[in-house]
Amino acid sequence: MVHHNGRWHVFASTTNNNGAYSLVYLNFTDWAQAGAAQHHYLDQTAIGTGYKAAPQVFYFAPQQRWFLVYEVGDNATFSTTTDISNPSSWSAPQRFYAGGMPQIIRDNIGNGYRVDFPGPHRPSPAPGRHSRTPRPIPSPARPTSPSAAPRGPGTSATAR
């Protein structure tokens, strides 16, 4: 999800009645409109059908392109566009690993069935390791009470 040109652009995993995963895109200007936003199912675009899940979107300024990264089972895949607001503009999927799941992942996947990758919400446990379980982002200590909250830029308070 990103906020761009005054709109929220949301990408999400979805399933049909048979449990098949796919991706959906919606956008709106205010969160109060989210429930009424039109759903654009990305399996009806160049992204295509088949298992797709866990989308993450970002803008890469050197190429002036939006990247949508997502799981496709035995690989991580991405599509690109120059217009995030046009769901039919996304390119066909491009795989990260030409030969499917790399051997290092096969050797360490345990009981997993797909290539999962770290993102802003799931940091990798260590360099060279691949995360299979969602983990919270480590964050600075959270205040335990309002009196312990930071009091402004460059200042902090000690928890009591």
Image (tube, rainbow, N blue to C red):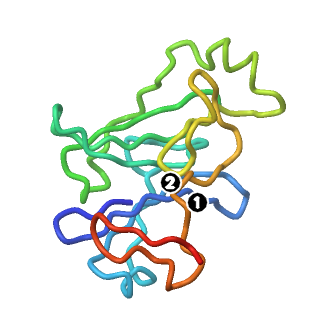
Q: What residue did someone put label 1 on? A: 14
Dots 1, 2 in contact, CB < 8 A:
yes
Instruction: Pick whichever, 43 or 31, lies toward us.
Output: 31
Picture residue at 31% right of the left edge, 82% below the top: 30
Q: Is residue 95 above or below residue 34?
A: above
Q: Is residue 14 toward the left or the right of residue 5 in the image? A: right
Other residues around mark 2 within 10 Å, as few (<14) / some (14–19) / many (≥20):
many
Picture residue at 61% right of the left edge, 29% below the top: 126
Among the 4 quarters of the image, the one containing residue 72: top right
Residue type marked 1: Thr
Q: Is residue 115 above or below residue 148?
A: above
Q: Is residue 50 toward the left or the right of residue 63 in the image? A: right
Instruction: Pick whichever, 156 or 29, lies toward us.
Output: 156
Residue 32 pos. (x, y %)? 38, 87
Residue 103 pos. (x, y %)? 67, 12
Other residues around mark 1 within 10 Å, as few (<14) / some (14–19) / many (≥20):
some
Residue type marked 2: Leu
Q: Mark 1 vs mark 2: which is more N-terminal?
A: 1
Q: What residue did someone put label 2 on? A: 23
Picture residue at 50% right of the left edge, 59% below the top: 12
